[in-house]
Image (spheres, coloured by chain):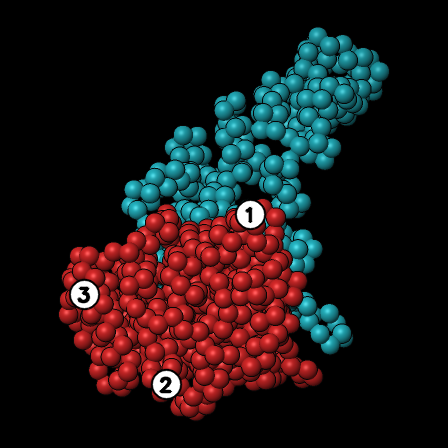
Amino acid sequence: MMEDLHLSTGHELKVLMRDGLESAKILDALYARIDVLDSKIGAFALVNRKAHRRPGGGTLDGIPVLVKDNICVKGEDTTCSSKILKGFKPPYDATVVRRLKEEGAVLIGKANMDEFAFGSSCETSCYGPTRNPWDLERIPGGSSGGSAAAVASDETIMALGSDTGGSIRQPAALCGVVGLKPTYGRVSRYGLIAFASSLDQIGPITKDVEDAALLLGVIAGYDEMDSTSVDIPVPDYATSLASDVKGLRVGVPKEYFVKGIDREVEAAVKRSINVFKDLGALVVDISLPHTEYAVSAYYIIGPAEASSNLARFDGAHYGYRAPDAKNMLDMYVRTRSEGFGREAKRRILLGTYCLSSGYYDAYYLKALKVRTKIKEDFDNAFKFCDIIVTPTSPTPAFRIGEKANDPLAMYLSDIFTIPANLAGLPGISIPCGFTRSGLPIGLQIMAKPFAEETIFRAAYTFERNADIEKRKPKL
Amino acid sequence: MNYETVIGLEVHLQLNTVTKVFCGCSTKFGQKPNSQTCPVCLGLPGSLPVLNETAFLFGIKVALALNCGIQSLIKFDRKNYYYPDLPKNYQISQYDMPLAYNGFVDIPANLTGLPKRIRILRVHLEEDAGKLIHPEREGHSLVDLNRTGIPLLEIVTEPDMNSPQEAYDYLTRLKSILEYLKVSDCDMEKGSLRCDANISIRPSGESKLGTKIELKNMNTFKGVKSSLEYEVKRQATVIDGGEKLFQETRLWDADKMITLSMRSKEEATDYRYFPEPDLVPFSVDKAFIEKIRQRLPELPEAKIRRFMKDYGLSEYDSNVLAGQSEIAEYFERCAQVYENRKAIANWITGDIMAYLKTQGASPADLGVSPESLAALLKMIDKGAISGKMAKEILSEAIETKMAPEKIIADKGLSQISDSGKLEEIVMQVISKNERSVKDYRSGKKNALGYLVGQIMKETKGAANPEIVNRILEKALEARQ
């Protein structure tokens, strides 16, 4: 029993600790697991070997949590898996990290990620790629690939990711775990190193829905340090975990079941919709007519904001500085040329171009208009349904290198997750089956802003009733 | 050829809030480099701005005092450019929706100009940048980010000024309004008020504007005026010489009193403005604006009119007194306890303001309270001291910060107006100076001056000269 502690969920460990289990035993089990596995998987950017339980108790007392490498932890390397931030140790904690510490969580390390969260495959990290625990030749998804892979391989109990266009939900789907992107404004972004400020949101990646609710309850809430956080009371998410979807209106958008979607994925999602129907939910056909423009709008708004957010990495104040620069301009050029990877440069260039005088109206302004249309689509749809159910990703995990040189194909892997970011909606990905070759498939459930409780109820009910095989990756 | 000058001004004003515009750091001037910083104003990764409500409130106050319309939705934008004094490499500013717009400032008539309305194009709120220090011959530069994030208000006029004097008058009136609102130190030398100018000239009668030149690096209002005067002449010389002007930015060299080219328009940067996603736009309640409007203090123009009406002062005196809120306040405190307002105005606009100007001091630093000044003036009226003595007492009181009443008492300086006592002295002087008395009586009338001098000597200058004259003449006539 004891040697299997790493397999447990957070809520299971809470019970065990109440009965006398020492949290150090959990850490020992995880360190042993990390030592054996992580050289193969590469989920960690940094392992905190000195992690320990803090005095004071709390909701997550003694429970190990892995934090994505773009979330500031005071005094610990926080690099966004980029050379340009190598050695950067923030002098402050992100609000979510402060809350984790206050609730007794044990911070076990920093999770590997796509550089600055630019990617859907976790291949662009300066620490090397993260591999999918279900098939080490495949990507774990991204950008929170390290967080998802570590949860799937039981190298951590829970993890935090960040989601700008699907970066929590897509890797959760591809790794067969639960990943929630909360409503924009539900969780403070203070201390999250920004990719696209109007889209970014921190959220939990966990082994089951109950843990996701537990972790969200800790990190959610208004923060006076983040003007975009919203002052709405945080409900007790545990009470929303009722196994009942009778009368719940489940919207199925026709635009999410078209060309390019993997047949096995489509079949698994359709089976899942029938599960809801069998459990007494009402399935409604809906339309989100502007879905096809979401990816284009996202790849303008995201890079535009990123080009400005990443301007501060110039070698002048912290992080990497190119040696032997001849003058200030030379320092800027060389630091940024050497410090950023290819995808980061691609997005900075794209965003800079879109914001340039003469192009702003045609690109950025137009993208904002599309964004408004997509929001309106959802507003209309939610008149007819309570949740919207779709595939999380059009395909299961693809091979490492398969799309690395085809940015457009890569960008399309977020086709079903991007709309929730543009509209600011909450969305979860939960496991809904496996392909014949044994790769996990994810089901996405979206709801109205601040309706995380509805999402949890639907996801929890599905998890309890769907008869999805409980498998662990063979490692 | 005769030219018409067209000038527009851009003022950057540091607001004197206690904390910075997007974080809780102190705005105190002159502290140890980088001691007043936090993750937010250092632009550290992950930090986020939160708007300081007081800075916003100050902005609204200024906007209302400048007769502007207020934007119904407040939104911020990012202005992107790279410079080490700007740690995020973008400045949070306002672009297409400034805090306020379409206002005006009326400048008063003066010796060289006419009263005139200067339109305000826009007023917007933004954050200040840090400071670069370049140690000589050390091959590196230093960055001080204490100033980073201090709230700045940018106030931009339409090109409504037609002479350097009008530009000077506009700045003077603007500063006066800002001082009344108590929203800024308005100290150009400390950089809390900075001014750039746009100037062009065109042949008189021509409707098309000439080539615009931007002037920077002026550190005083006089410098603004001088640089504009220089530019008017320079531009006219260029055009008269058959050459063309090109759009550029020029720097004022206050030592050489010339402007020098800094960069041409072609090198102008694209700031790639876009809405600041870290600050949520918010709407402004009309009732809130009205509340602020009602709480605005009386502004210079209203005060000038009131001074003319209530105290019967001239327009000139009213302008001078109301030009600085502290002077106006000093005057009014004095006027409450002393009736002769013209006399108060003369003393303040004369001796007191001259002293303040040479010392660069404010009325608060003055050792003489308005009540003491009033007491001094009353003593002149009563004949207790002479006007000349009052001047000396005032200057000594200012120097030593001693109350004028005490100086008078300590030195026994009060004027001798007691006729009985003076008569006694006059008699003594007459008996001691028989020759002069003889001279006077034989028609040498200037002997009188000598005798008065002797009386003054005897009384150490404290004798009331009018009474002395009267008694002396009477005594000399009587003896005949």
Residue A226 in the image: state x and y as whole percent.
45, 56
Residue B193 in the image: state x and y as whole percent.
54, 56
Q: Secondary structure at mark 3?
A: helix
Q: List the residue tagged with mark 2.
A: A437
B333 lies left or right of A420:
right
Q: CA distance from mark 2 to mark 3?
A: 28 Å
Q: Quadrant of the N terminus of chain B?
A: bottom left
Numbered disc in front, either 2 or 1: 2
Q: Quadrant of residue B393?
A: top right
- Could you say which is closer to the camera, residue B377 or residue A174? A174
Residue type, numbered disc 2: Ser
Q: Quadrant of residue B102?
A: bottom left
User: Mark number for residue A57?
Assistant: 1
- Chain where mark 3 sits: A
What residue is at 35 percent from the left and 68 percent from the top? A430
The residue carrying pointer 2 sits among few (fewer than 14), some (14 to 19) or many (20 or more) residues within 10 Å by Cα, namely few
Hue of chain B?
Answer: cyan
